[in-house]
Amino acid sequence: MTSPWLSVRLLPANRMFIRVFGVFGSLLLAMTILYGLLIIPLQRDSLLKVLYSQATTVSRSIIQASSDAMLTDDFGFVVEHNLQVLQNNKSIQSVLIVPRRGSALSIATSGWEMLPAAKAPIKPADYDVESYGIVDAPEGGARYRYITPIRFSGVSWGVMQIDFDTSDYEANINEMYRQITYISLFTLLAILPIGYFFALWLTRPIATISLAASRVASGELDTHVKIDRNDEIGDLSRSFNQMVQALAENRRQLENVNLDLEIKVTERTQELDELNRTLDQRVRDEISKRKEQEQLLIHQSRLAAMGEMIGAIAHQWRQPLNALSLVLQNIQMQYRVGQLSETSMQVMQDKAQQLILRMSQTIDEFRNFFKPSKQAETFDLAHAIQAAADILEGMLKNHNIQLDIDCPADIHLDGVPGEFSQVILNLLGNARDAVLAINQPQPRILIHAKTVGKQVCIDVEDNGVGIDESIMHKIYEPYFTTKEEGKGTGIGLYMTKMIIENNMHGLLAASNLEQGVRLRITLPISAESVTAA
């Protein structure tokens, strides 16, 4: 049986060890290379400064010792002095003295010679500016060349060029490369083992914890690690053991919870089976209640419509009744004064018959308008809107409300004409109440219809009180009304929305205008209108 305690004696050949050791070695190598890149230029500059110091010292001594000879053109003394300098300083290969006028003097260990100034390898800038550096020698190799102007009392006499042997310089450079190589190798050999053991020290406990985590992930919650260290890794191992103990405890609790859950699921399953057995009956009961509620709403809507109709009839009959009363009073007056002739009696009788016929026609119009019919048919939109407007004509005129209808005469819809006229009647009644609620001095209602593709948009707008945006989403709910108590049933817009969206497959939307409200009805045009277009 595997022990739950993992040993820290793990093989170092793991990816983490390779990465840590690789990073350590790479950093060490990079530091060594950086050291070489930094120290080599410094050493080169130091050696060049030694050569420069030697060159300036030699040039000054030659100029000081030979200044009188140069001014008097005593080249014998100049040659003898420079040969002595070459013998005393083996690193000097040659000395070239070029005056501004006259021949140049080249002195070397092998001899000396006079050269025309034009053949001397001197540039015009050398007469005024000091220059120095490593140059290539004609016979091969390299040499250090120092060129300095020769001045006496501020007057430029010429220029001096001194070439130095660079064998010592190159030997020093090569020795420096060897020393840097030895130091780098020694550093690598000395520090790499330290890095190796450091990587082992760092990665072994981490690998132990990683292996333990893998076992815990596979479900072995009795796995623990034992790392006796007083650092962050030791704290990590102790925290890991605490976590595993917590996971084991949570597993036990989860098993208990699962057992309780299985019992509850069994109980709920039994309850669900019982519910399924009674669900059909509940659904039928709910549908029956819903139908009863809808019938009640329809009945209430009809009662409300009948109330509107009675009020409209009263307004429609008011003028004919007044006229009929005047006819009767006129008959009585003519009879009393003895002026009631057969002709005048016939005229007033005909006028009374016309008034009574008009009142009878009003009753027929209202009866046909509210005549129950569920038979869908194709009907004229303009005629349906005008029929609804005629019902409320008397009420609107009584309150001086201007009604404008803008509807093309060639639009036909599919549906129940009476239901659609009831929709328009509901919207006109709401618009009438809206303009009267704020005592609008110039009350106005507009019905505008237009075709958009295969649809028609019917807008009913008023300039009355608007709808509060906070309750805009509730205006279609049954029994919800913004009118005063006793002045609204709260089912007008609900029934309107049901007729438009459920029966006529359209849309009903409300929006506030700058002043007033717009109710927009969107309905599909009948195939007859589409074919005609």
Image (cartoon, grey):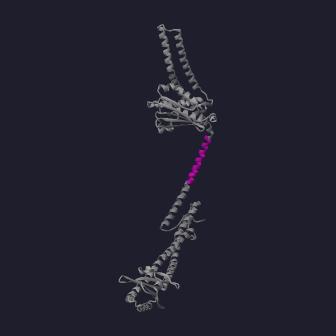
Q: Residue at x 55, y 28 (%)?
A: 386
Q: Closest to the observer: 187 or 73?
A: 73
Q: In front here: 111 or 221?
A: 111
Quarter of the figure with residue 54: bottom left
Given residues 192 and 355, the one toward you in this image is 355
Q: Position of residue 318 (x, y in %)?
A: 49, 20
Q: Residue furthest top?
A: 338
Residue 87, given in percent of the width and then of the height, sits at 44, 91
- Front residue of 289/52: it is 52
**262 drawn magenta:** yes
Counting the numbered discs, the total is 0
Residue 26 position, x and y percent, is 53, 72
| Residue 3 shown in magenta | no
* Quadrant of image for the N terminus: bottom right
Question: What segment carries the magenta color?
Answer: 254-275
Visible residue check, residue 4: no
> Quadrant of the image for the C terminus?
top right
Q: With respect to residue 318, does 221 lie above or below? A: below
Q: Give the quarter of the image for residue 102.
A: bottom left
Could you tell me which residue is drawn at 56 percent across and 21 percent down? 361
Residue found at x 35% / y 83%: 153
Q: Main secondary structure of the magenta part?
A: helix
- Residue 532 spot, x, y in % from top left: 63, 34
Q: In the rendered image, is residue 316 in sight?
A: yes
